[in-house]
Image (spheres, rainbow, N blue to C red):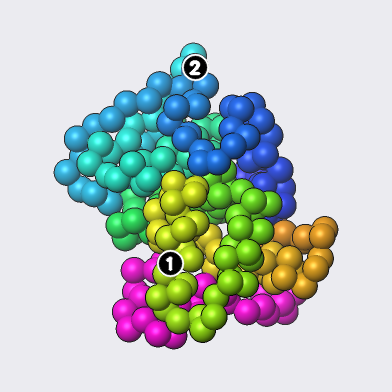
Amino acid sequence: MIDYITKKQLYAFVEKLRSQLGLFDVPVNVMNALPSNIILEFADFKTYGFSGAAFVGSKSDMIVLNKNRAPTDQNFDCAHELIHLTKHRNYGINYFECFEKAAETGNSTCKESDLLDENTCDLRILEWQANEGAAELLLPYKLVIPDFSELFKKLSSYTWTEMHDLFTVLSQKYNTGYSLTYNRIRNLAYEIHQYENGISNIQVLSANAQQKSGITVPDYAALADRLYINVNWFVPY
């Protein structure tokens, strides 16, 4: 059966993984920090949206990434596959084939092996864990929220240009794609709202948990949307 965990529990798992890999500083380069039992390969996949695959082995595992994708995308893809290999290896899954719905969004979907019983395991939960876990590994909420808050307070008019520059600065610091950074801030809106209101012990909740609790908060990232005509490529990871 699938391990249904909360966002807080997932972040605790990622924090333990971060410690095991020695990834204490940003930017995080997951590809250079993989444990010795995980082999990393690059393949010439012609479709940009095919981000890569992960294979579970008896003695060693393998991650295969698309060599044609941007380095920032490859780093996120590697983190995504790493979460699969470390968090989901006991579900009877032999491999994950991962596809990105839209280029550079950090929004991946996977096709798991046929050994996984879809009647007892919701594949969407596995994908949420891999996407959210990868985002937390690259953009730790305890670091990125204060960084965002400091930059946000310096804005004068909250125009699209100012917000775009803000996300660009964060992307450069964390070496992540612009859209991943944008979506990360959007998905941390509740946690950011707490930080902005002086709450030190931040409650970490998923979007579903917030909805069930009737929690609504400002969408800081959406300030840019109001002045941007076409934001269809901004897809939450």
- Nearer-the-camera pick, 36 or 151: 151
Q: Residue at x 45, y 74 (%)?
A: 162
Q: Residue at x 59, y 37 (%)?
A: 25
Residue 233 magenta = yes
What residue is pinned by disc 1?
A: 165
In the displayed structure image, the side of residue 87 where residue 95 appears, left or right:
left
Give the residues in magenta.
211-237
Residue 217 magenta = yes
**Disc 1 marks which amino acid?**
Asp
Q: Quadrant of residue 96?
A: top left
x and y, in percent, of residue 110 in the image: 40, 48
What residue is pinned by disc 2?
A: 36
- Nearer-the-camera pick, 20 or 195: 195
Q: CA distance from mark 1 to mark 2?
A: 38 Å
Instruction: Give the vertical position of 23 relative to 122 (above or below).
Output: above
The 10 Å Cα crowd at callout 1, few under 14, some 14 to 19, many 20 or more, is few
Instruction: Give the vertical position of 212 relative to 132 (above or below).
Output: below
Q: Quadrant of residue 229?
A: bottom left
- Dot 1 or dot 2: first in sequence order is 2
* Tag 1 secondary structure: helix
**Disc 2 marks which amino acid?**
Ser
In the displayed structure image, the side of residue 187 where residue 202 appears, left or right:
right
Magenta-drawn stretch, dominant element (helix, strand or loop) = loop
